[in-house]
Amino acid sequence: MQSISAPRSALQSLPPARERRVDVLVIGAGAAGLTAALAAAARGAQVLVLARGSLPESNSAWAQGGIAAALDPSDSPGIHVADTLTAGAGLCDVAAVSVLAHEAPALMRELAELGVPFERDTDRFALGLEGGHSRRRIVHVGDATGWAVTQMLIERVGAMPRITVCEQAQAVDLLTAGERVVGALVRLAGGTWLRVLAAATVLASGGAGALYGLTSNQPAALGEGIAMAYRAGAEVADLEFVQFHPTVYRTRDGQGFLITEAARGEGGLLYTPAGRRFMPAYDPRAELAPRDVVTRGIVAAMQAEGCDHVLLDLTHLPPDLIEHHFPTICARLRADGIDPVHDPIPVAPVAHYLMGGVRTDLNGATNLPGLFAAGEVACTGVHGANRLASNSLLECIVFGRRAGEAAASYRGRAVPLPDPLPIVSVAAVPPADWRTALATIMRAAGPLRHGDGLRAALTELAAWPISADPADADGLTAVNAALTARLIVAAAMLRTESRGGHFRLDYPQSDEAWRKHTILCRDTSPVFVTAIAPAPALAVD
């Protein structure tokens, strides 16, 4: 398979744009982006943060379960590393996982000192248990941990004079000067354009769950940062590994509402609508197996009984435990007429997290000088083929800080004028309801995949537009979303085995020869490597 064709620009023609220069541009305002901005500003950099919507609209703010850290006397970072490696199905980068686990305990204490109101058990953190963890190590703020952490970061960013936040800002293309990334072309609210020139750019634009339609993610999580990076020449890695959260409730208005992993960690059980508990027969870890295993168990149960959901039952748990640990979930379900104290919760697997992304080293650096990435848009190798529960917010903060610090080291370097973006023609027009059309195509890259379906999906996606009119904000979004969708499907087509979040019905076994990472890069054939860290980018003056 050749590389996925992509022009250097998503724009049909170049719009007039005003210009702004900063030391560090951060694209994305979730936990990773805000942490990167704070770290860069603390080192003297002038930082501009672009928020796709309004603060605090991000997947980080929606995160319920908590943050993993080895804080219990019976636990250790080494055990946390081992659990993460097990969940990652042989593809984790050990160095990245070690950084994550060893920095976690001190980081949780720091967040608590900064005002995140983690729940306590007398003088200690109250630690929860989630699937795939062998110890209780989940610190949490009820079932709204992401919201609490994001609010604290927003407050700190607001108090930092070196940081400016621009909301309702859609980054469309990265700007390059030769091999170096020198900023981004941004569409602002109202349709005006801004060319941001920056010594360093940090991508923190989140994942791609919304490509699948029903998702636990924000609607803007369409993988646009991955598309921009790929067009600029950045390497992307392991995009075939998509995690489907096993327990998501479909609301009355058709949206996905995540029922946190902690619900099963506290004793929640899964049944079919006919009343059959099925996970113990599927895996000895039952409801506490890793997410990919529980997802496939639910899919098998739904197929066996011809239903579109299963039931997550908490009714045998003490009512005060349910009310105390899951207040947000209780309120949302009761708004739809379901009381989890008395009623089982209908759930099904939906797209939740992208393990792959823009290939980075431990400091967020990519193969392109001046471009860094952190959070879900990045692939450090920390998650391997399947993310361990509650490692995502932790990754955002640990590697967001590292990326921000590394980006700040570019402060003071001259920023050359970017190469002119080419003017390209629109080969096709996306469907009017392109989100629904794209979600239908992406079923081929769902929890269960087959080569025939993946080939058909690639054929359909090849007909989608590669550029859009600058005045068409929705069209520009569709162009970037469709490119990321093609990259995910292409990576899934290449990997002829099953591993972690990638399960091929035509290749149902794992293959030791495939203990490699899939690397895709514009104008280059796919390659497969054993180490995730990219070659060091060339030095810049």
Image: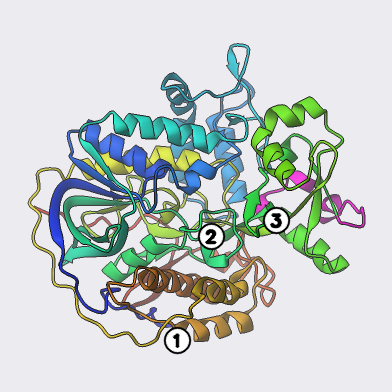
Q: Report whether residue 285 is seen.
A: no
Say the numbered circle drawn on residue 252. Answer: 3
Sequence-wise first label, 1 or 3:
3
The local secondary structure at tag 1 comes to loop
* Amino acid under disc 1: Ala
Residue at the spot x=52%, y=50% of the render? 383
Residue located 51% across and 85% down the image: 460
Does residue 249 belong to the magenta stretch? no
The answer to whether marks 1 and 2 mark residues whose Cβ atoms lie closer than 8 Å is no
| Magenta-colored span | 272-291
Look at the image and say whether residue 287 sits in the magenta stretch.
yes
Above/below status of 196 relative to 158: below
Q: Position of residue 64 (x, y in %)?
A: 59, 40
The residue under label 2 is: 209
SS type, badge 3? loop
Residue 86 position in % (x across, y down)? 62, 47
Residue 143 lies, with reference to residue 345, above or below; the image says above
Q: Give the total number of marks visible in the rendering.
A: 3
Residue 229 in the figure: left or right of residue 326: left
Residue 463, numbered label = 1
Q: Is residue 183 left or right of residue 329?
A: left
SS category of the residue bearing label 2: helix
Q: Which quadrant holds residue 181?
A: bottom left
**In x, y percent, where is residue 36?**
32, 41
* Residue positioned 63% across, 26% down in the render: 127
Farthest residue toward the front? Answer: 190
Which badge, 2 or 3, is on the more N-terminal residue?
A: 2
In this rendering, the answer to whether 505 lies above or below 286 is below
Give the quadrant of residue 496.
bottom right
Can you tell which of label 2 and label 3 is closer to the viewer?
3
What kind of residue is marked 3?
Answer: Arg
| Nearest to the observer: residue 510 or residue 385 | 385
